[in-house]
Amino acid sequence: MSNPNPASGSPDKDPVSGSPDKDPATEAARAAAGGTDRAATATAPKRPEPTARPSLGRLFLDNLWAANTVTVTVLAVLLAMLVGAVLIIVSDPDVLATYGYITARPADALSASWTVVSEAYANLFKGAIFDPEASGFTAALSPISETLTYTAPLVFTGLSVALAFRGGLFNIGAQGQATIGVVLAALAGFLLPLPPVLHLVVALIAGAAGGAVWGFIPGILKARTGAHEVINTIMLNYVAVYFLSWIIIQNGVQNPGRADAISKPVDSSAQFPRLLGEDLRVHAGILLAVLATWFVAWLLNRSTFGFELRAVGANPDAARTAGISVSKTYVLMMAIAGLLAGLGGSQMVLGSTANALTPLVVAQIGFDGILVALLGRVKPWGVLLAALLFGALQAGGNRMQSYSGISLELVTVLQALIVIFIAAPALVKAIFQLRAARAARLQTSLAKGW
């Protein structure tokens, strides 16, 4: 018989829900908590799954093909050499004749093109770095000796231009500063009777002082009057060139045994010592160039003046607000830049390039210094490497002209092409589809060095 009263029923039975051992309030709380947990789980951000680290080889390839300074520079040189190869082919009439029947016999045109281009670049290498066919110590080291001889003065003029660039000025006057430097160094070299080591030091000081004065003039004009340094330095270049032409033919300076415009020879006591013997032209000036590169790098990155110089180059108004004397920085910067260019000019008569003044004794080292500074990204050690490349092109270009019949002007075109591609990194990146590098780690824009 069943019990009509639910309350008196079995104690294990819930009177409301009919579920044993379950409290309604507890069940509702548990259900609400479960829904909240599910909602939180659904809305919570998912943690990214850990990915496998790329291999060392993969990282190397990724960094190699990133748009960093080294990659862009190397590819720019390769592009310049490719365009130069086309110019070599076009300038050879015998090779062009084979293209007249290229559809009938394409192998002739390809073979002739390869022969003339490979021979030209092989002679460029043999004249600049090493000739495997050379016999003897002197012949084997002659190419690198010539390269270092051409490199030494370019380092100084490149550093001169780069230093001014970092301070926000465009020093076009390295040519004039080098010209005044070579004049005073030569005058001290054959007018002052001094012992060997002291004579060289005095001649170098004279050349450096002349360049510093010639750089100080546009610096003080910029600081005091705001006159543009480009105009001033260009005009001073002409003044220096005509001063050189005038002083050569003066009594006491012109060589008494010559009727043309040439000065007395510089005494041997004022000459740089040769590093590899008298038969090879490389001299101790290249060691001075490396020392100057280290000094400029220290000056820019470690000294107080270098910090002020870079601050003025980045933003003169902000530097002035911070208490930096912009006028003083301009004057000192141009004086130091002129000093470096004067040392570069001094090497043209105190080294092994020449031992007397002539109207063309400085050649184009001042204007080539602009290209070297641009190619080196206006960084001191980059300038040294760029000067080494230009020195190799000049040394190898002489052999190209002699052995391959390639015009020496074509080497100048090759230098210009390298600078064009270096100055346009976006073009190189677009051609080779380079990936962008981290801006904090790698600076590919030339303007970041200004």
Image (cartoon, rainbow, N blue to C red):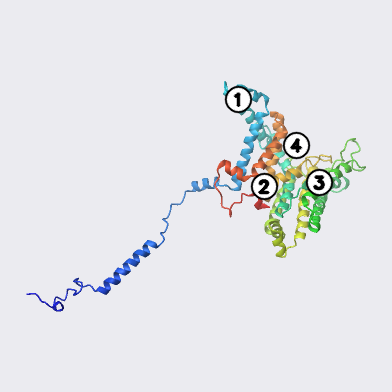
Q: CA distance from mark 2 to mark 1?
A: 37 Å
Looking at the image, tell me whether mark 4 or mark 2 is earlier in sequence order.
4
Q: Residue at x 68, y 43 (%)?
A: 388
Spatial CA span between label 4 and label 2: 31 Å
Alpha carbon distance from label 3 to label 2: 23 Å
Viewer-proximal residue among 3 and 264: 3
Disc nearest the viewer among 2 and 1: 1
Instruction: From the viewer's side, name the closer residue of 298 and 450.
Output: 450
Considering only order in the chain, which callout, 3 or 1, is on the residue closer to the N terminus? 1
Q: Can you say which quadrant of the picture contains the N terminus?
A: bottom left
Q: Are marks 4 and 1 in contact (CB under 8 Å)?
A: no
The residue that mark 1 highlights is: 109
Q: What whole-number distance in Å separates the C-alpha atoms at marks 1 and 3?
A: 47 Å
- Disc 4 versus disc 1: distance between alpha carbons? 42 Å
Q: Amino acid at mark 3?
A: Asn
Asked whether the beta carbons under mark 4 and mark 3 sit within 8 Å of each other, the answer is no
Query: What amino acid type is highlighted by mark number 2?
Result: Gly
Query: Of residues 291 and 172, which is closer to you in this image?
Result: 172
Amino acid type assigned to the residue bearing label 1 in the image: Ala
Q: Please tell me the numbered disc located at residue 279.
A: 4
Binning the other alpha carbons within 10 Å of mark 3 as few (below 14), some (14 to 19) or many (20 upward) gives many
Q: Which mark is residue 237?
A: 3
The spot of residue 395 in percent (x, y) is 71, 37
